[in-house]
Image (spheres, helix red, strand yellow):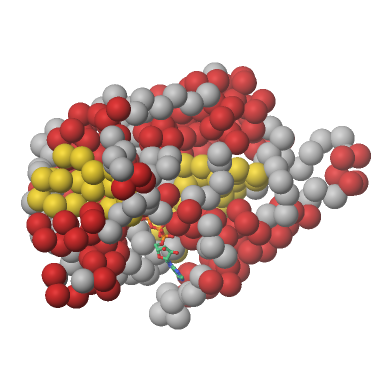
Amino acid sequence: MTTVDLTQRFPTLTPHEMLAGFVPSRRFEEARFDNYLPNPAFESQARAREELQNFAEAVGRTRGGFRLLRRAPSPGEGIYLDGGFGVGKTHLLAATFFTVRSEQKAFLSFQELLYVIGALGMTEAVKAFTPFRFLAIDEFELDDPGNTHMVNTFLSQLMPGGTSVVTTSNTEPGALGQGRFNTHDFERQIAAIAGRFRSLRVDGPDFRARGAQVVAPLGEAEYRAWSGMQGQARFAPLEHRALNRHLLEVHPARFRKLLSGVDAVGVLDASGMPDQNVALRFVHFIDKVYDLGVGLALSGVPLGSLFPETYRHGAYAKKYSRCLSRLSELLSEARSSVAVVTPSSV
Ligand SMILES: Nc1ncnc2c1ncn2[C@@H]1O[C@H](COP(=O)(O)OP(=O)(O)OP(=O)(O)O)[C@@H](O)[C@H]1O
Ligand SMILES: [Mg+2]
């Protein structure tokens, strides 16, 4: 039986197909408020859970019949969950999504939202999302003036009509865009975006608890043992370089489809990525692998050498740290699956 060759996949996706797929991915399908365990050392966690739970229940309620008789709909509300990586923001976002009692809801990443707006055009995108009572937008980030303008226009046309939005970010609203473009010229737009949300900070350490201490890639024997355990028809092994080349050809909004029917990805001979475009695509790919609950193992250089040291202080520093945290979690999962089956080979 042959394995999956990701480099031969060039997924296409209509915006309407995308709209239908906007639900929390496999990793978060069980995320609920009652399996979110607030860390007692960080009060903001219990507070965030309570506020979001109230919010989610209220969004479901506002769909009452008499609402339709009112002349103007009550505007949607916004909550902005901000905190470091691995503190459970996406878990809380998915729990909010599942608690909202309405079918008219969508859960998507910020990048997917921008992609749909770009593909449909603003007017059609606003029309497509207008029926939604609730939008969950994961990983809000302003990378450039273009997306700042786009998202500001979108939210200003959508939210007053009654769509509520909860979003997560590693960046506090006031600092959006900083270090990436001249935010000074876009102060008004950034302030307008931030003004639509009530900010809820989630403090605490990385729940994955591996952010600082980076896990090593799999050794040759370990990697072989792990790849032998994968169902071949749903396993995509490939060289890191071939993966990087291919990712430059596929828009990140299509990574979900690129990975459809894949249970595990094996990345061989991973090496440093001195080109920022390549590195960011790789980061987005890992984000998707992680979110989808796809397994991943990596052989090659230590994780600490994947991204040049300068990236750790640059504009995308958080994206890289988060990627290393996620890679560490994925590698630990891969390593423990090997350890369970072949304790002697490790
Ligand atoms: N308080 C918690 N109780 C139970 N599970 C948690 C808690 N916090 C985090 N988790 C789990 O830890 C993992 C990481 O959490 P999550 O992905 O939600 O963090 P995040 O803040 O969104 O991180 P990132 O900034 O990397 O996106 C998930 O599997 C999540 O379900
Ligand atoms: Mg997250």
- At horizontal 15% and vertical 62% (from top left) the residue drawn is 222
Tell me residue 184's x, y (percent).
35, 32
Residue positioned most to the front:
1
Q: Is residue 27 above or below residue 159?
A: below
Compare residues 118 and 226 and report the one nearer the observer.
226
Foreground residue among 82 and 234 = 234
Residue 94, compared with residue 337, is above or below; it is above
User: Does residue 176 appear anywhere in the picture?
Assistant: no
Q: Position of residue 125 (x, y in %)?
A: 59, 25
Is 168 situated left or right of 75 in this image?
left
Left or right for 163, reference 306: right
Measuring from the top left, give residue 97's x and y in whole percent.
Answer: 61, 53
At x 31%, y 47%, the residue is 232
Q: From this viewpoint, is residue 104 visible? A: yes
User: At which x and y percent is residue 124?
Assistant: 62, 21
Left or right, 285 with reference to 24: left
Q: Nearer the viewer, residue 75 or 189?
A: 75
Q: Residue at x 48, y 22 (%)?
A: 118
Residue extending furthest toward the bottom: 40
Quadrant where the N terminus is found in the figure: top left
Q: Which of the 4 image quadrants contains residue 261?
A: top left
Quadrant location of the C terminus? Answer: bottom left
For residue 246, side relative to residue 299 (left or right): right
In the image, 9 versus 274, the foreground residue is 9
Taking the spot 16% from the left edge, 39% from the top edge, the residue there is 239
Q: How many marks?
A: 0
| Residue 238 picture quarter | top left
